[in-house]
Image (spheres, grey):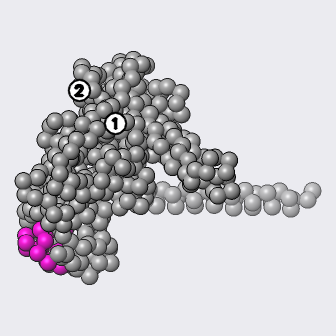
């Protein structure tokens, strides 16, 4: 009998047994490692979509504000030069007139007929019609416009109108539910729903006019014709005036912009009270504080603010208050300043003559100064447009001397009549409008208050003589 396989088996068994016993002994001897510590997690086991109150309809929130959103129809006469080759077929006329029409929306903000809309909705229009949600139609007049914010105020003669409730747009947060209301593409009043996608957007839409952008971005559908309409919150309060879309196809792709109602309201008040928009002026040139600049100023790299690069003019508001070059402005009237655009927008919204409380850093130390703002130099000048193409300005000593007007003449001097104005030949540059409809006028706001749709009567002084002028306000 061959015993070699049996011996080999027992040898292998003994080896495995010895290895197992050795590993067990080593495990017994080695200390156990501590278990990994679980991270603290915030858990919410409630079903997805469960809220404290289930909202199945926003109809009640929309019910009160929908009647306050109106359609605005504009039209204007455009003169087009006729090419020589076509003149024999058109009676030899060098020009032809063509009427262009536009469509937008607006929001009634007072029961006596003041309406906020966009400047681009009413710009250059010589006729405005407003259609209410109950199918009533009114002729509207322009109270004032501000191309730099794309805000315009118009008015209809009516009483007891439905008016929007205005919210504080500074309290909007990304993710808040909003609705856009207007008359897109002329189909009739339409409500779309979305959220606040961003706030404080600057997208360059108003760069050509040196504008002030602080847009609310929303994905609520906004299309052509929505301009000037309402952006409202889930409680039915006005938070913005729809203004623009960014699109490659002229249609909605979920990127719409609205003017915050806080900004629109401040512009509206100024236009109603004075006929113009007067913006605050600090008198500084600034640069944004970058991490590299912060390091040069021996500040933490995450310090935010803008650096005063120059005081201009040398006797301006900032200089008079004691500011110096290299001061870093961080807060104005409680609002944080992180960019040059922030500073420009905040200062512009403070009326000239008002005081601004400014926090700043100088040599790493915090300080606070109170500055009395003046009016922006580029806002000083003609008071604005009384009628399409007719610019007027209150009489000043300089203008009296320029146009040789006696001191006993008071009113609004006509500084320009555009060649394409429908009032070319009715009014003339250098004439003084003493009264309108037998009411004395010495400001644009006063003149617009007494200007009425249809036939008007102006009492005018020109070259030492007085005369009456009748005209149609279209």
Residue 317 seen: yes
Residue beneath the point at 51% across and 49% down: 79
Side (left or right) of 349 relative to 368: right
Instruction: Find the residue positioned furthest to the front.
Output: 465
Query: Of the numbered discs in the image, which one, if any, rests on residue 54?
Result: none
Q: Does the magenta segment cover residue 111?
A: no
Q: Which residue is mark 2?
A: 112
Eye-nearest disc, 2 or 1: 1
Q: Check disc 1 and report its element: helix, strand or loop.
A: strand
Q: Residues within 10 Å of mark 1 (few under 14, many from 20)?
A: few
Where 160 sits versus 351, above or below?
above
Q: Residues within 10 Å of mark 2 (few under 14, many from 20)?
A: some
Instruction: Find the residue positioned furthest to the bottom.
Output: 296
Residue beneath the point at 67% across and 51% down: 88
Residue 277, percent across and down? Answer: 23, 51
**Region rendered in magenta:** 314-332
Where 352 sits versus 263, above or below?
below
Residue 336, percent across and down? Answer: 22, 58
Residue beneath the point at 24% across and 21% down: 159
Q: Check disc 2 and report its element: helix, strand or loop.
A: loop
Side (left or right) of 251 relative to 282: right
Distance CA(mark 2)–CA(mark 1): 23 Å
Name the image quarter holding the N terminus: bottom right
| Circle count | 2
Q: Which residue is mark 1?
A: 472
Residue 382 seen: no
Name the image quarter holding the C terminus: top left
């Amino acid at each position: 009998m061959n015993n070699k396989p049996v011996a080999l088996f027992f040898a292998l068994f003994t080896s495995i047994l010895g290895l197992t016993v050795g590993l067990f002994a080593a495990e017994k001897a080695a200390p156990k490692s501590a278990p990994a510590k679980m991270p603290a997690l915030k858990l919410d086991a409630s079903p997805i979509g469960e809220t404290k109150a289930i909202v199945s309809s926003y109809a009640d929130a929309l019910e009160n504000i929908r009647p306050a959103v109106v359609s605005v129809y504009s039209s204007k006469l455009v003169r087009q030069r006729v090419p020589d080759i076509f003149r024999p077929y058109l009676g030899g006329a060098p020009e032809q007139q063509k009427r262009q029409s536009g469509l937008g929306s607006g929001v009634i903000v007072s029961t006596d007929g003041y309406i906020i809309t966009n400047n681009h909705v009413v710009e250059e229009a010589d006729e405005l019609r407003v259609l209410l949600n109950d199918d009533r139609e009114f002729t509207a007049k322009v109270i004032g416009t501000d191309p730099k914010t794309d805000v315009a105020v118009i008015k209809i003669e009516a009483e007891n109108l439905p008016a929007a409730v205005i919210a504080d747009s500074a309290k909007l947060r990304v993710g808040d539910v909003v609705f856009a209301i207007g008359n897109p593409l002329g189909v009739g009043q339409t409500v779309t729903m979305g959220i606040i996608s961003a706030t404080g957007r600057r997208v360059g839409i108003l760069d050509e006019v040196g504008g002030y952008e602080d847009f609310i971005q929303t994905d609520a559908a906004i299309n052509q014709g929505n301009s000037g309409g309402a952006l409202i919150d889930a409680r039915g309060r006005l938070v913005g005036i729809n203004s623009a879309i960014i699109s490659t196809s002229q249609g909605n792709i979920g990127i719409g912009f609205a003017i915050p109602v806080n900004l629109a309201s401040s512009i509206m008040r100024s236009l109603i009270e004075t006929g113009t928009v007067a913006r605050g002026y600090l008198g500084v040139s600034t640069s944004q504080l970058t991490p590299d600049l912060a390091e040069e100023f021996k500040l933490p790299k995450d310090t935010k603010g803008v650096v005063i690069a120059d005081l201009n003019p040398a006797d301006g508001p900032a200089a008079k208050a004691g500011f110096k070059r290299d001061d870093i402005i961080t807060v104005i009237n409680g609002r944080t300043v992180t960019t040059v655009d922030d500073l420009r927008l905040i200062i512009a919204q403070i009326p000239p003559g008002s005081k601004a409380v400014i926090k700043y850093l100088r040599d790493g130390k915090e300080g606070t100064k109170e500055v009395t703002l003046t009016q922006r130099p580029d806002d000083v000048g003609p008071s604005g447009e009384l009628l399409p193409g007719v610019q007027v300005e209150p009489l000043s000593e300089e203008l009296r001397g320029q146009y040789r007007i006696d001191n006993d003449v008071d009113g609004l001097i006509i500084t320009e009549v555009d060649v394409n104005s429908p009032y070319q030949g009715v009014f003339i540059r250098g004439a003084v409008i003493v009264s309108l409809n037998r009411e004395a006028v010495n400001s644009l706001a006063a003149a617009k208050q007494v200007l009425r749709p249809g036939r008007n009567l102006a009492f005018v002084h020109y070259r030492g003589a007085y005369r009456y002028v009748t005209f149609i306000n279209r």
